[in-house]
Image (cartoon, grey):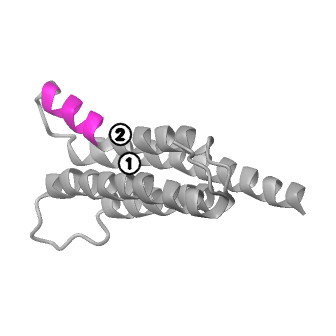
Amino acid sequence: MTDKKTSDINLLRTVALTIVLIGAAVSLFFMFNAGRNQKSILLIALFTAWVLSPFVGLFILNKISSRWTVAPARTSVFCLMIILTMGSVVAYSGVLIPPDTKTAFIFLVAPLAAWILIVTTFLIAPKISNKSDGHNQI
């Protein structure tokens, strides 16, 4: 049973990492498309770093979570990776943006919201891990 559980977690991890990579590329595509008329290279570079930062944060959280031994804590990280990436892509696509909203607004707010969720998961998931096995994982 443990081998099946480990195999399922490894599959979920692989799927989550793949989705994050693809989501980062698609998010950059939407950002560059939205800023195609922008002349400032500095502004484009800053937006690129800001839009990519949650994806980098998810990769770092994935690395940190590999030290956690309890499946629910790691599973919550992988699910966050998938949900956050899908949410970012939908937000950046412009499908849910009201017509009068400035284009840059979503590219400023979505990464901020993503960081709030990443930090919250980082703080809560180890507590789940500690309660489940009685060891300090961080």
Instruction: Identify residue type, mark 2.
Output: Leu
Compared across the picture, whether 119 is left or right of 38 comes to right
* Crowd band around label 2 with a 10 angstrom C-alpha radius: few (<14), some (14–19), many (20+): some
The extreme front residue here reads: 134
Question: Where 9 falls versus 44 (above or below)?
Answer: below
Q: Position of residue 28 (x, y in %)?
A: 36, 42
Question: Which range of residues does the magenta coloring cover?
Answer: 42-50
Frontmost of labels 1 and 2 is 2
Above or below: residue 105 compared with residue 26: below
Q: Mark yes or no: residue 81 visible.
A: no
**Residue indicated by mark 1:** 27
Element type at marker 2?
A: helix
Q: CA distance from mark 1 to mark 2?
A: 8 Å
Residue type for callout 1: Ser
Q: Residue at x 68, y 47 (%)?
A: 14
Residue 114 is at least partly visible in this image: yes
Q: Report which residue position mark 2 lands on.
A: 52
Pointers 1 and 2 in contact (CB under 8 A)? yes
Residue appearing at x 80%, y 53% in the figure: 6
Prevailing secondary structure of the magenta residues: helix
